[in-house]
Image (tube, rainbow, N blue to C red):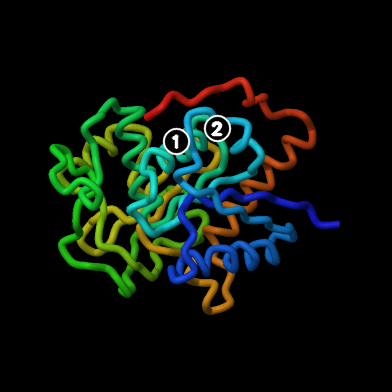
Amino acid sequence: MKTNIRIGLIGDFNAEVKAHVAIPKALEFAGQITGFNIAPVWIQTSSIIDSIDSRLSAFDGLWCAPASPYASMDGALRGIRFARETHRPFLGTCGGFQHAILEFARSVLGQIEADHAESNPAASMPLISPLSCSLVGARGRIFFKTGSRVARIYGRAETIEEYHCNYGVNPRFRSLLEDSGMKITGVDEHNDARVMELEGHPFFMGTLFQPERSAFKGVAHPLIVEFVRAAASVRAAKAQGKMESETTRRIDPI
């Protein structure tokens, strides 16, 4: 019998958003490669309130999906923070990538003014700002940092991926991340941030591009396959009783 892997999808499901349709399919393809039965569950951002540990602990991995602004930015940030602090495997794509960086800047780096220009155009610190050129419907080449996790996952130094976004990391503030544990490990031809990884975490990665779109071609994406494998490790640890109990933890409101 196949092992069931539960993946929480942080986002506000909309059947008209192609990425939302693609993500469950992409997880299914990854499950076929890894031999696991993947059970994705959507978690509305507005439902992620202060005391969330026991509910999110039920998932083996968390994926923050595209299509921001979210119904609740704070809810999305709390879910991301939970994954980061409890070492739950995490993948953020497009808007998920942007908000994972924002959560880290606020919670870890103490940059409480850091914000997203899409939801707050008047932000004093627009950490996530409009791209110089829209990437909606675009495809582009990404170059990986030598020795990075993403380079090992792909097994090569570069790739071409699909985007659907208008916002990214503001170059003015990129040094804040590079001097911390959150590393930019994938860039485009202009050296703009496209992939991030968190050091010291079993699996915490984000991409501005949308790897889930590979599902429309019937292809299992290597990044999603590795995310599923990381989540399976959590499931195995739970089964062996090795994971620390998280039900007594509390994530402070953001």
Residue 253 percent coordinates (x, y): 41, 27
**Is residue 109 toward the left or the right of residue 77 in the image?**
left
Cα distance, mark 1 to mark 2?
Answer: 8 Å
Q: Nearer the viewer, residue 251 or 1?
A: 251
Question: N-terminal of the two: label 1 or label 2?
Answer: 2
**Residue 145 in sight here:** no
Residue lying furthest bottom: 217
Across the whole image, how many numbered discs are drawn on residues?
Answer: 2
Alpha-carbon neighbours of circle 2 within 10 Å: few (<14), some, or many (≥20)? some
Marks 1 & 2, CB-CB < 8 Å contact = yes
Determine the residue positioned at 48% across, 39% down: 79
Alpha-carbon neighbours of circle 1 within 10 Å: few (<14), some, or many (≥20)? many
Q: Which mark is residue 2?
A: none
Determine the residue positioned at 59% across, 38% down: 56
Relative height, residue 219 to residue 112 (above, below) = below
Residue 20 percent coordinates (x, y): 49, 64
**What kind of residue is marked 1?**
Arg
Q: Which residue is mark 2?
A: 52
Helix, strand or loop at label 2? It is loop
**Residue 163 in sight here:** yes
Determine the residue positioned at 59% across, 64% down: 24
Q: Nearer the viewer, residue 189 or 11?
A: 11
Residue lying furthest right: 1
Residue 236 percent coordinates (x, y): 74, 41
Relative height, residue 216 to residue 163 (above, below) = below
Q: Which mark is residue 78?
A: 1
**What kind of residue is marked 2?**
Ile
**Is residue 150 toward the left or the right of residue 231 in the image?**
left
Relative height, residue 127 to residue 132 (above, below) = above
Determine the residue positioned at 25% across, 49% down: 119
Helix, strand or loop at label 1? It is helix
